[in-house]
Image (cartoon, rainbow, N blue to C red):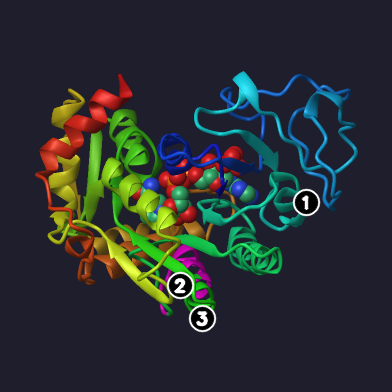
């Protein structure tokens, strides 16, 4: 099984799960050495992050590679993240073919890679579609794409539109698409919520924080992904599946649960959406000001707040757990 985005929150949890099920797990990673758990020996140029493009069919150990040479590199052994037999370098936008050749007899790909920042819509959309096509050309039988509940043709965020467009292509190709709610665990979207609660003593709540947040347990997700791989995707192909607990929680309640579980004393400040939008738009009109939030983000959050999503959780035989239980588990993981 090849997992893309090997350093990511979900990939790092999934690899040991698949390995324990008796599968050989290989990873594709953009950064390779960016995470200390994936640590090649220094190359001749000293830099570990090779952004050069192109493809070379052979797999060259990073310790011996020339940094100017685009390679697909495997570095198994103690430097690999747990569960991975090898991790190969590949960024969205580049070819996955050398990785598929080096990983040898890949039966399934789990696509978790997600680019962020400028150009990410193109990287995520065209880049993942290219990897889908290259996987099919290489004879990979099962490809699983991790999408989001905010995916939609009219999503205001690039993220939601890209996820929708890519998900449609996977469905048309007879592959498997999972739309995820917020995976409660030590990283990913939930980890970002914890980090932002840690950063500031004041937590702004748009329109009082009534937006519904769908959550689910990280371990349950890993079991569903493992079982899907083991079953070769049978019964799940050509459809989008919503993986989240059936009942959402208001954003305010999720943030309150985070603050309580992580021992954070924070003040919630309700902000009317019209005031937030006006302030962000005013800042956008001034080139000297760079806010981390754009008006499209605010409108996207409001759009999500109006949407409800039926859950396919019961189809997989898992029942919902209280929010506090999920968050307590995430705290334990982070210790
Ligand atoms: N976590 C959630 O709650 C959640 C909810 C809904 C949907 N999802 C979806 O599930 C997937 C995995 O989520 P996650 O939480 O594990 O995300 P994550 O921790 O951000 O992992 C994504 C990984 O993608 C890789 N990546 C980043 N830029 C890349 C690029 N330009 N080219 C290739 N790879 C790149 C990075 O790993 P390397 O450094 O190894 O390349 C990164 O760690 C994502 O597609 C996300 O949209 C997650």
- Work out how far the residue at label 2 is from the one at label 3, CA to CA, in angstroms: 12 Å
Depicted 30 relative to depicted 152: above or below: above
Left or right: residue 200 versus residue 271 is: right
Query: Does the rendering let one see residue 128?
Result: yes
Q: Which residue is drawn at 20% across and 71% down?
A: 310
Q: Residue at x 43, y 43 (%)?
A: 10
Between 182 and 139, the one lying in front of the other is 139
Q: Nearer the viewer, mark 2 or mark 3?
A: 3
Which disc, if any, is residue 98?
1
Asked if the residue at tag 3 contacts the one at tag 1, i.e. Cβ–Cβ closer than 8 Å, the answer is no
- Work out how far the residue at label 2 is from the one at label 1, CA to CA, in angstroms: 27 Å
Quadrant in the picture for residue 85: top right
Between 209 and 254, the one lying in front of the other is 254
* Highlighted range, magenta: 154-166
Q: What element carries label 1?
A: helix
Residue where numbered disc 3 is placed:
172
Quick one: label 3, few (<14), some, or many (20+) residues within 10 Å?
A: few
Quick one: label 1, few (<14), some, or many (20+) residues within 10 Å?
A: many
Label 3 C-beta lies within 8 Å of the nearest ligand 1 atom: no
Question: Is residue 198 rendered magenta in the image?
Answer: no
Residue where numbered disc 2 is placed:
164
Nearer-N-terminus badge (2/1): 1
Q: Which residue is drawn at 65% across and 68% down?
A: 136
Q: Estimate the x, y position of residue 75 in percent, counting from the top left.
A: 70, 29
Q: Main secondary structure of the magenta part?
A: helix
The quadrant of the image that shows the C terminus is top left
């Amino acid at each position: 099984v090849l997992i893309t985005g090997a350093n990511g929150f979900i990939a790092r949890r999934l690899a040991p799960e698949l390995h324990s099920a008796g599968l050989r797990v290989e990873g594709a990673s953009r950064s390779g050495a960016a995470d200390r758990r994936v640590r090649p020996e220094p190359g001749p140029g000293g830099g570990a992050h090779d952004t050069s493009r192109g493809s070379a069919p052979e797999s060259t150990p990073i310790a011996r590679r020339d940094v100017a040479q685009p390679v697909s590199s495997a570095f198994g052994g103690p430097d690999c993240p747990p569960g991975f037999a090898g991790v190969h370098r590949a960024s969205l936008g580049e070819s996955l073919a050398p990785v598929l050749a080096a990983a040898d007899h890949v039966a399934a790909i789990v696509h978790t890679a997600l680019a962020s920042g400028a150009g990410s819509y193109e990287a995520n959309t065209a880049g993942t579609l290219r990897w889908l096509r290259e996987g099919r050309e290489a004879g990979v039988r099962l490809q699983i794409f991790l999408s989001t509940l905010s995916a939609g043709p009219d999503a205001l965020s690039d993220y939601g539109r890209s996820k929708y467009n890519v998900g449609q292509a996977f469905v048309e190709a007879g592959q498997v698409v999972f739309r995820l709610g917020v995976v409660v665990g030590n990283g990913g979207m939930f980890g970002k919520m914890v980090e932002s609660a840690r950063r500031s003593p004041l937590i702004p709540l748009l329109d009082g924080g009534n937006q519904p947040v769908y959550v689910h347990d990280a371990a349950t997700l890993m079991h569903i992904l493992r079982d899907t791989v083991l079953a070769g995707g049978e019964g799940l192909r050509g459809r989008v599946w919503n993986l989240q607990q059936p009942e959402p929680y208001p954003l305010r309640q999720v943030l309150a649960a985070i603050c309580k579980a992580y021992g954070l004393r924070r003040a919630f400040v309700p902000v009317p959406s019209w005031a937030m939008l006006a302030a962000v738009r005013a800042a956008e009109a001034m080139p000297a000001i760079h806010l981390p939030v754009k008006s499209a983000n605010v409108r996207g959050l409001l759009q999500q707040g109006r949407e409800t999503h039926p859950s396919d959780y019961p189809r997989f035989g898992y029942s919902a757990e209280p929010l506090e239980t999920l968050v307590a588990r995430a705290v334990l993981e982070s210790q």
